[in-house]
Image: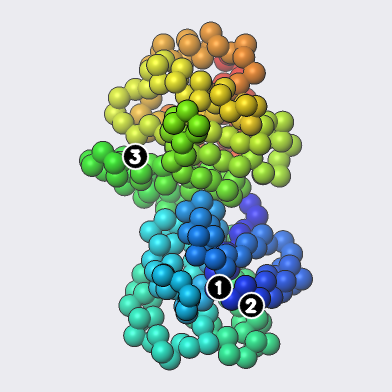
Amino acid sequence: MKHTILIVDDEKIQAESLQKVFHKERSHLHVKIATQESEITNCIENLYFNVAIVDLRMDDFSISGFDIIKRIINLNPFAKIIIQSAFLPEYSEDIKDIYLSGKIAAIVDKTKYDIFKVKILEEVDKIINAFEDNPKMYQKSLEGLYADAKNETETYSKGSKFEQFVSILLAQMGFIHITRRVRDKSLNEIDLIIRNEINDMFFQKFSPYILVECKNSEEKVDKNNFIQFLHKVENTNGLSNLGVLITSSALKRNTYIEAVRTSKTSTKIVFLSNIEINKLIYSKDMLEEFKSIIDEQVKDN
């Protein structure tokens, strides 16, 4: 999996300068910058990243660096955060409070740029090495997110938490751009839309987008759920020919029968039930496991 770094800074020149440092010194990392308020919000909500480098002072924004950090912690529990600022003493008390979250990996003073950029690279290396040295950390985190989503009783939160879990599950496979709760022109709501930019020959055969339908209920998914989702995928003007219907429970027999009946179409719907979810969580290579699941379902059809 290629690791992604998000640089958040209201000073575009400084953000671009740091991005160039990464491109030169750590070309194996994918680095995204966000310098406008709307861009920052969009990246936090729809981009998966391992590390966020966040400037604290946002003079012209309605949000502060602390607001951004809290939002990241809420939406991306896997991300580690590096705080950067030239005004650290000014924020010392607030930093103490946010540090208790356990998500702050480092605090870097950026007053002297030559020292600052070296320190940033060192801290990012530490985080990435820790991720790679402890793969079971991902499993434990995914276990917790999945259990929390399944045990949630409030209807909206139950759906939202499951979508968050699914988006992070897919992000572990290498899908970086994942948009949540989208409405198409016919006002059909799509739970997740994945930009199919993954560097994998298998997925490059599919269209640019993958649609995902999330069902977090004890009730089994029936053929009507399948048909509705199939129509959503088919009505994308060719932008998607692959959909994933994922449920925390199971699927009724008539759903599988309907899938076989419609298997001659150019659109493929992959089923992920509780059994497949657990296989993915505990697999050594999540993307390969996902591909194996698709292979098996193609054979069954």
Q: Residue at x 30, y 24 (%)?
A: 219
Q: Is residue 219 left or right of residue 166?
A: left
Q: Is residue 144 left or right of residue 196?
A: left
Q: Residue at x 36, y 50 (%)?
A: 144
Element on which disc 3 rests:
helix
The mark found on residue 166 in the picture is: none
Q: Residues within 10 Å of mark 1 (few under 14, many from 20)?
A: many
Q: Quadrant of residue 292?
A: top right
Mark nearer the N terminus (3 vs 1):
1
Q: Residue at x 62, y 14 (%)?
A: 265
Q: Which residue is mark 3?
A: 159
Q: How many marks are shown on the rendered structure?
A: 3
Viewport quadrant of the C terminus: top right
Q: Where does residue 155 sit, x and y in percent of width and height?
A: 26, 38
In this rendering, the label closer to the viewer, 2 or 3: 2
The amino acid on which the numbered mark 1 sits, given as a three-letter code, is: Asp
The mark found on residue 9 in the picture is: 1
Q: Where does residue 198 sit, x and y in percent of width and height?
A: 67, 44
The mark found on residue 14 in the picture is: 2
The amino acid on which the numbered mark 2 sits, given as a three-letter code, is: Gln
Element on which disc 1 rests:
loop
> Are the two marked residues, 1 and 2, in contact with CB atoms closer than 8 angstroms?
yes
Q: Residues within 10 Å of mark 3 (few under 14, many from 20)?
A: many
Q: Where does residue 276 sit, x and y in percent of width and height?
A: 47, 32
- Could one spot residue 296 in this view of the protein? no
The residues bearing labels 3 and 1 have C-alpha atoms spaced at a distance of: 32 Å
Mark nearer the N terminus (2 vs 3):
2
Q: Where does residue 246 sit, x and y in percent of width and height?
A: 45, 31
Q: From what the image shows, is residue 296 above or below residue 198?
A: above
